[in-house]
């Protein structure tokens, strides 16, 4: 089968389209014939070496397709089932072997491409808004990169929970899109000082929570946007990693809470995975959650997909099609 392999860390050019053996499912595993694979920021961190993965490896953390073989003892799925999954390496390929407990059924009305597009970023938006800081009516949230893959979904989930949402984006085009999916206010953080704007929009009070996936460029000012005893949820580093922090800063800025969550810890077992995907697929089929696929690339052009993600030009999901 064809797969995108990484033999040396580096830029998008290290992604190699190769023939490798089709994997066989072991006990408790199923093999998925992939119809669409999601491209995520974590793939770029693993490719560049920011997150260490033993070489060589097949990139990719998310896909949707059809079960075409199962190993011993698998009860969750059977051959022919339409499924999707996230958080298992090896999705930039024609086939992947996945622990069966991680596979969820894709309901009628949701295409393989939509399913691949919502698994990782959608479950992330879900756990951030429902568990890390469970938003409720009356809360105000600041969502950075609100027109990105996670951002567009997080804005919608936050609105469903009744929060007021202030988004940040880099362009007018992205601002329009963030508003379209429900953001109450949008700040163009490349042109405006977002700290000043957040204070203006909250009458100097600040927000209950910042969901910050941008990292280095936004972290310090984000701390200044939070109400006393509010939450700083740092969940990504699209602009680069945040340097080490003196915990005393949290006290000085108002007894703030800081967390650096990871999807894997919020999808710890099958019950937790299906709780999130049942909500996501249910909202999609009810017309409450729009999943925006920005662009698709043939699997062979994974390097171009990474360039697109780095370019900051995409608004929503990038998919690879084998
Ligand atoms: N912790 C977790 O569980 C978890 C799970 C999923 C994703 N994440 C994180 O969430 C973030 C978003 O992931 P995504 O896949 O949905 O990507 P994305 O948001 O679609 O793309 C990243 C966005 O970040 C903004 N950005 C700001 N500074 C940037 C810079 N210097 N270079 C590139 N982009 C910059 C851009 O939006 P503007 O142009 O509007 O600034 C860009 O579109 C990533 O940091 C990822 O690691 C974390």
Image (spheres, rainbow, N blue to C red):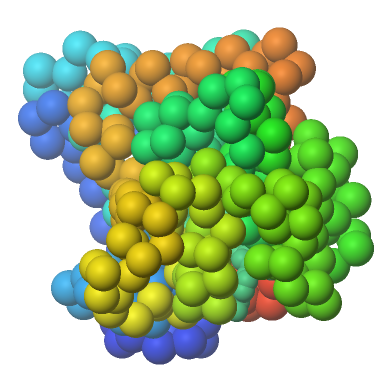
Tell me the quadrant of the picture where the N terminus can be found.
bottom left
Q: Position of residue 106 (x, y in %)?
A: 51, 20
- 267 sits left or right of 134 in the view: left
Tell me where residue 98 sits by quadrant: top left
Residue at 39 percent of width and 76 percent of height: 242
Image height of 101 relative to 148, above or below: above
Q: Position of residue 153 (x, y in %)?
A: 63, 39
Residue at 44 percent of width and 28 percent of height: 134
Q: Nearer the viewer, residue 7 or 164?
A: 164
Could one spot residue 263 in this view of the protein? yes
Q: Nearer the viewer, residue 41 or 230?
A: 230
- 47 sits left or right of 282 in the view: left
Residue at 86 percent of width and 39 percent of height: 180
Could one spot residue 4 in this view of the protein? no
Image height of 234 relative to 164, above or below: below
Residue at 21 percent of width and 26 percent of height: 269
- 174 sits left or right of 12 in the view: right
Image height of 109 relative to 205, above or below: above
Q: Nearer the viewer, residue 189 or 317?
A: 189
Image height of 82 relative to 92, above or below: above
Q: Position of residue 284 (x, y in %)?
A: 66, 20
Tell me where residue 175 sits by quadrant: bottom right
Q: Nearer the viewer, residue 266 or 17?
A: 266
Ligand 1 quarter of the rendering:
bottom right
Q: Position of residue 50 (x, y in %)?
A: 33, 78
Q: How many marks?
A: 0
């Amino acid at each position: 089968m064809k797969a995108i392999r990484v033999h040396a860390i580096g830029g998008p050019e290290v992604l190699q389209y190769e023939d490798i053996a089709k994997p066989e499912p072991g006990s408790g595993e199923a093999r998925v014939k992939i119809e669409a694979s999601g491209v995520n920021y974590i793939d770029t961190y693993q490719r560049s070496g920011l997150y260490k993965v033993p070489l060589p490896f097949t990139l990719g953390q998310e896909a949707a397709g059809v079960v075409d073989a199962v190993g011993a003892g698998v009860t969750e799925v059977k051959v022919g089932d339409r499924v999707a999954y996230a958080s298992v390496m090896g999705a930039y390929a024609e086939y992947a072997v996945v622990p069966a407990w991680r596979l969820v059924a894709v309901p009628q009305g949701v295409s393989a491409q939509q399913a691949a597009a919502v698994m990782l970023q959608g479950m992330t938006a879900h756990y951030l808004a429902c568990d890390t800081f469970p938003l409720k009516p009356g809360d105000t949230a600041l969502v950075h990169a609100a027109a990105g893959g996670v951002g567009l979904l997080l804005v919608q989930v936050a609105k469903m929970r009744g929060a007021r949402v202030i988004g940040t984006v880099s362009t007018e085009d992205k601002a329009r899109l963030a508003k379209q999916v429900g953001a109450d206010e949008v700040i163009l953080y490349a042109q405006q000082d977002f700290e000043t704007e957040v204070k203006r929009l909250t009458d100097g009070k600040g927000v209950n929570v910042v969901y910050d996936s941008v990292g280095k460029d936004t972290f310090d000012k984000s701390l200044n946007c939070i109400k006393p005893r509010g939450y700083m949820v740092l969940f990504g580093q699209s602009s680069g990693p945040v340097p080490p922090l003196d915990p005393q800063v949290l006290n000085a800025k108002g007894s703030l809470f800081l967390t650096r969550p990871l999807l894997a810890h919020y999808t710890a077992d099958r019950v937790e995975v299906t709780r999130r995907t049942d909500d996501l697929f249910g909202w999609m089929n009810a017309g409450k959650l729009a999943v925006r696929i920005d662009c698709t690339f043939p699997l062979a052009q994974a390097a171009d997909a990474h360039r697109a993600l780095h370019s900051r030009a995409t608004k929503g999901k990038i998919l690879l099609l084998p």
